[in-house]
Image: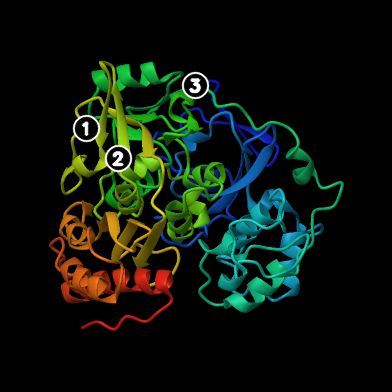
């Protein structure tokens, strides 16, 4: 289509001639908007962050910070974007920019525009200051009452010279938007609707189909097409590995993949929901996932990454899989030939391979109810937030009134070629009293689950020890007593 347009800082810009592999960052910089920078090209530093007008779950708009280095420019067709240049000007700075300057939150300035955009997303967040998933104990909220700033909103932004204290000081000192703030006023109107897109350049195509059936038809005809949702994996492949797919099919905003249901028998999460959206919709009603979400990369990534995409890549270190394995999740797979349902424990067949056939997509994730009364998610990484896990373990246990373990489901990541269920450990727990002796015995079994390897993140021995400690940690948290390994 020749009429593909995106609104940037209030100005309509054409996407005509943009190659499908061109990232939003490269395209924006080509427009002269050089505030956003490339620091890592894989979504870890936040120097490239910009604001996108997204639906807020009601009838309004949420200014959402995303990594522009990971998003195809073509995916912005019909959307509204605000860069650091659109927040304010030298003679009339935005409150966020003024706060950063006053607090000494910028030195070399390379990362500052990205910090400003992530900070602005939190500045404009609806109901900021109300009690939410943030924990005071974790330092998530740095102020009391109306206007409290969740500093975890900046967890995806790295600073290499200034230091975080003045940046945090700038953030927590922010008040609320003025009544005449145009970006605040924009929140009361609906976000732009998703539009069907067809862009062709440099011998390649980017297509955002109108329906799931159209998407099925496209990938049935061209099975080598790159199917993208949040594009957090696509961006890495394009930027660091030079991938240039002849056809890119975007499915992230298809209504058929964005359903949500919470019933008596189970929960259904559309594969196209972002992790941030899933967290908001679940409202903490699945404690295991409530533990997972804050540890999954950063807000910048969670604002784009989808459950379907995380499971679709079949990475052995994807954080969602262990938690969903412990929840006994099932996947609904769809294709041009219809749908089928598979147990997530049977979904992975090898390193980054699955039972999905040609032309099949993950349509939704189903979690049965009721949930286990005792659950926990433990992730080991070099950094607490915004890092790839060395090992992840998720637990869901039912302990009867008599103190005996009636059922146990344990999902593991980072210890084999695929995410796995710790079947031997589950068997070692079921039928035994939930006490220190049983936990120590089961922990010794857990340490030998999978086939952990040594790499730059951790040694095989370290992973085995962390597996054992994860179960002991769960017991300590539940029983409030110390268990010393035998």
| Above or below, 274 relative to 408 | above
Please provide percent x and percent y for residue 247.
Answer: 32, 28
x 67%, y 58%: residue: 131
Name which quarter of the figure residue 188 lies in.
top right
Residue beneath label 1, please? Answer: 356
Residue beneath label 2, please? Answer: 312
> Of label 2 and label 3, which has the lower sequence position?
3
Residue beneath label 3, please? Answer: 196
Q: The residue tagged with tag 1: helix, strand or loop?
A: loop
| Residue 68 in view in this figure | no
| Above or below, 462 relative to 31 | below
Total labels drawn: 3
Q: Nearer the viewer, residue 130 or 257?
A: 130
| Above or below, 20 relative to 386 | above
| Residue 191 in view in this figure | yes
x 30%, y 37%: residue: 330
Q: How far is the residue under mark 1 from the one under mark 3?
A: 26 Å
> Of label 1 and label 3, which has the lower sequence position?
3
Q: Nearer the viewer, residue 201 or 281?
A: 281
Q: The residue tagged with tag 2: helix, strand or loop?
A: helix
Which tag is nearer the camera, tag 2 or tag 3?
2
Query: Disc 2 vs disc 1: Cβ atoms closer than 8 Å?
Result: yes
């Amino acid at each position: 289509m020749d009429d593909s347009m995106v609104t940037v800082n209030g100005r309509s810009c054409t996407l005509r001639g943009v190659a499908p592999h061109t990232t939003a960052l490269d395209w924006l910089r080509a427009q002269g908007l050089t505030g956003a920078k490339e620091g890592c090209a894989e979504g870890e530093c936040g120097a490239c962050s910009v604001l996108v007008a997204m639906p807020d779950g009601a009838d309004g708009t949420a200014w959402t910070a995303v990594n522009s280095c990971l998003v195809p420019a073509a995916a912005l067709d019909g959307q509204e974007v605000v860069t650091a240049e659109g927040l304010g000007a030298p003679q009339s700075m935005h409150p966020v920019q003024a706060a950063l300057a006053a607090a000494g939150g910028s030195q070399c300035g390379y990362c500052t525009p990205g910090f400003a955009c992530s900070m602005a997303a939190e500045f404009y967040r609806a109901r900021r200051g109300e009690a939410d998933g943030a924990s005071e104990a974790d330092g998530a909220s740095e102020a009391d009452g109306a206007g409290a700033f969740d500093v975890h909103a900046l967890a995806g932004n790295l600073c290499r010279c200034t230091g975080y204290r003045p940046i945090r000081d700038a953030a927590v000192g922010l008040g609320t938007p003025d009544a005449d703030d145009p970006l605040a006023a924009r929140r009361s109107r609906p976000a732009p609707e998703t539009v069907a897109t067809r862009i062709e350049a440099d011998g390649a195509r980017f297509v955002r189909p109108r329906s799931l059936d159209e998407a099925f038809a496209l990938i049935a005809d061209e099975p080598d097409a790159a199917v993208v949702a949040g594009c957090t994996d696509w961006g890495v492949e394009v930027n660091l590995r030079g991938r240039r797919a002849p056809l890119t099919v975007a499915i992230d905003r298809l209504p058929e993949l964005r359903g949500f249901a919470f019933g008596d028998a189970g929960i259904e999460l559309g594969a196209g929901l972002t992790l941030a959206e899933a967290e908001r919709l679940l409202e903490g009603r699945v404690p295991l996932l409530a533990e997972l979400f804050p540890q999954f990369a950063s807000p910048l990534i969670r604002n784009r990454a989808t459950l379907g995409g995380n499971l679709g890549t079949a990475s052995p270190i994807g954080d969602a899989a262990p938690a969903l394995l412990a929840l006994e999740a099932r996947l609904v797979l769809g294709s041009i030939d219809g749908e089928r349902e598979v147990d997530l424990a049977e979904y992975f067949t090898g390193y980054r391979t699955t039972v999905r056939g040609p032309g099949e997509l993950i349509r939704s994730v189903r979690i049965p109810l009721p949930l286990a009364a005792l659950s926990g998610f433990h992730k080991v990484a070099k950094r607490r937030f915004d890092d790839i896990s060395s090992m992840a373990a998720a637990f869901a246990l039912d302990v009867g009134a008599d103190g005996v373990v009636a059922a146990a489901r344990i999902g593991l990541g980072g210890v084999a070629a695929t995410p796995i269920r710790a079947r031997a450990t589950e068997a070692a727990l079921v039928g035994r009293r939930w006490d220190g002796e049983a936990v120590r015995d089961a922990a010794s079994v857990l340490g030998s689950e999978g086939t952990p390897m040594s790499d730059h993140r951790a040694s095989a021995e370290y992973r085995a020890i962390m597996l054992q400690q994860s179960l002991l940690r769960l017991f300590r948290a539940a029983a409030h007593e110390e268990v010393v390994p035998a």
